[in-house]
Amino acid sequence: MKIIIINGPNLNMLGRREPDIYGNQSFEEYFQKLTGIFPDLSLDYFQSNHEGELIDCIQRAEVEYDGIILNAAAYSHTSLAIAESLACISKPIIEVHISNIFARETFRHHSVISLHCKGVIVGLGLDGYRLAVSAIATM
Ligand code: DQA
């Protein structure tokens, strides 16, 4: 089974970005551990700060992967273009947020992408990605 994790803007800064909210670990470090936890799965990781690149990746993922884990970061709250790209996807999508978006500013409380996702994991730190992989692996 092939699963891709797609991270949106500023998530390339994990480990250095607001560590009190997002922790001290880079995603690259975490991703290495994650692949070790699931030796029987093929896991890939893509990050971009650009909306169009995220959409290109989502469209490719429909063909190449069995499931998508998406943290669209700030675009989760604003991007109708990403939401509409997800509407075309037949593979399971899990939305992940590292922080608890409901315990933060009100502009983070709404996600325009959630209605296209099978499930949403919020506020459990980077471990949310592991839970999302487990969920897709058992679908
Ligand atoms: C985030 C939450 C978003 O509100 C924020 O813009 C991010 C990260 C999270 O993982 O907690 O960049 O998606």
Image (spheres, rainbow, N blue to C red):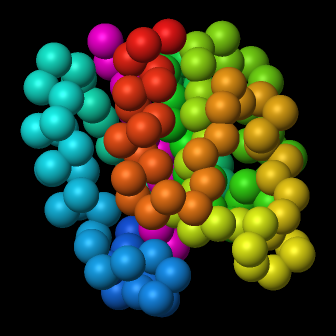
Can you say whether 105 is above or below 115 in the image?
A: below
Q: Position of residue 42 (x, y in %)?
A: 23, 23
- Quarter where residue 28 is shown: bottom left
Q: Is 5 one of the magenta-colored residues?
A: yes
Residue at horizontal 24 percent and vertical 58 percent from the top: 30
Front-lying residue, 89 or 30: 30
- Is there any visible trace of residue 29 in the rendered image? yes
**Marker count (numbered):** 0
Residue at horizontal 77 percent and vertical 29 percent from the top: 116
Can you say whether 2 is above or below 5 in the image?
A: above
Residue at horizontal 15 percent and vertical 50 percent from the top: 32
Residue extent of the magenta highlight: 1-11
Front-lying residue, 68 or 53: 68
On the rendered structure, is 29 left or right of 26?
Answer: left
Q: Is 6 one of the magenta-colored residues?
A: yes
Q: Position of residue 57 (x, y in %)?
A: 51, 36
Can you say whether 63 is above or below 23 in the image?
A: above
Q: Position of residue 108 (x, y in %)?
A: 79, 69
Q: Position of residue 126 (x, y in %)?
A: 39, 58
Front-lying residue, 133 or 8: 133
